[in-house]
Image (spheres, rainbow, N blue to C red):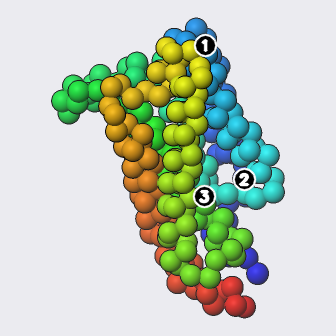
């Protein structure tokens, strides 16, 4: 027996989100700041979108999961158009007195939102027996992916054109940029997992009993 976290069967919301992404992608593909950077930033996003489309018929996630996942996809696509350090984000920088453009931190924070669907899959597929694993595994998974992505960025910056490499890194002179990006990813995961626990506290209470049945 599976655990049902959602009664949603309509594909209206996921299709609207996919259509919105397609529109944003099309607009941002027009005259980006640097075409090589645009490709470097958008290839991972296209892989994510393609994987979600391929998996959708096999496992229908909740509308909340699709909405949360779309945040990173949209933010990253916009960042690929401008390069992250050049995204028009001055109102935030000026309001809080930051000395750098923190749009990339926001995008990294949104990566953590993928902890929500990870927790959802753990529940609906009956892959775990305790709430501790539901709470910890998604956060650890996101932190691991964040670290791996920073390594990939480092290798790209090493072998790519110098200008494109710096643009993809987006460190803006911060020697601790990679560590802060990983922290942003992880904090986003903690928030998303906390949201999952809040929305599905009743299902989580019966997790062990449901699996044993």
Q: Quadrant of the N terminus?
A: bottom right
Q: Secondary structure at mark 2?
A: loop
* Sequence-first disc among 2 and 1: 2
**Left or right: 164 in relation to 87:** right
**Residue 178 in the image, given as x and y percentages of width and height:** 42, 39
Q: Pointer 2 and pointer 1: residues touching (CB < 8 Å)?
A: no
Where does label 3 land, which residue? 117
Q: Residues within 10 Å of mark 1 (few under 14, many from 20)?
A: some
Q: Which mark is residue 190?
A: none
Instruction: Give the mark nearer the N terminus: 1 vs 3.
Output: 1
Residue name at image x 40 percent, y 23 percent: 85
Q: Which residue position is annotated with label 2?
A: 10
Residue placed at 69% from the left, 33% from the top?
Answer: 46
Which numbered disc, 3 or 2, marks the residue that appears first in the sequence?
2
Give SS at disc 3. helix
Where's the C terminus, which quadrant? bottom right
Query: Residue drawn 37% across and 43% down?
Result: 180
Residue 35's disc number: 1
Instruction: Give the Cα distance between marks 3 and 2.
Output: 18 Å
Q: Residue at x 74, y 39 (%)?
A: 50
State the image quarter where residue 152 is shown: top right
Q: Residues within 10 Å of mark 2 (few under 14, many from 20)?
A: few
Instruction: Using the numbered discs, state the Cα–Cα distance from disc 1 to disc 3 in whole angstroms.
Output: 32 Å
Q: Is residue 9 above or below residue 124?
A: above
Residue 87 position, x and y percent, is: 41, 21
Where is residue 154? Give x, y as percent.
52, 33
Instruction: Residue 174: tell me if it is visible.
Output: yes
The residue lying furthest to the top in this view is 31
Residue 179 lies left or right of residue 1; in this view the side is left
């Amino acid at each position: 027996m599976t655990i049902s976290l959602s009664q949603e069967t309509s594909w209206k919301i996921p299709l609207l989100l996919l259509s919105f992404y397609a529109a944003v992608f099309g607009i941002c593909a027009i005259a980006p700041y640097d075409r090589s950077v645009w490709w470097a930033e958008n290839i991972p996003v296209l892989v994510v979108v393609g994987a979600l489309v391929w998996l959708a018929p096999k496992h229908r996630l909740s509308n909340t999961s699709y909405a949360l996942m779309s945040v990173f996809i949209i933010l990253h696509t916009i960042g690929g158009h401008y390069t992250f350090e050049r995204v028009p984000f001055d109102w935030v920088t000026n309001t809080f007195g930051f000395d750098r453009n923190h749009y990339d931190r926001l995008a990294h924070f949104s990566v953590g939102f993928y902890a929500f669907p990870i927790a959802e899959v753990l529940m609906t597929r009956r892959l775990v027996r305790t709430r501790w694993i539901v709470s910890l595994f998604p956060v650890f998974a996101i932190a691991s992916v964040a670290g791996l992505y920073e390594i990939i960025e480092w290798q790209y910056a090493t072998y790519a054109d110098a200008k494109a490499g710096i643009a993809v890194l987006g460190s803006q002179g911060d020697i601790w940029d990679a560590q802060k990006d990983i922290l942003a990813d992880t904090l986003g995961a903690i928030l998303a997992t906390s949201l999952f626990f809040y929305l599905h506290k009743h299902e989580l209470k019966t997790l062990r009993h449901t699996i044993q049945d």
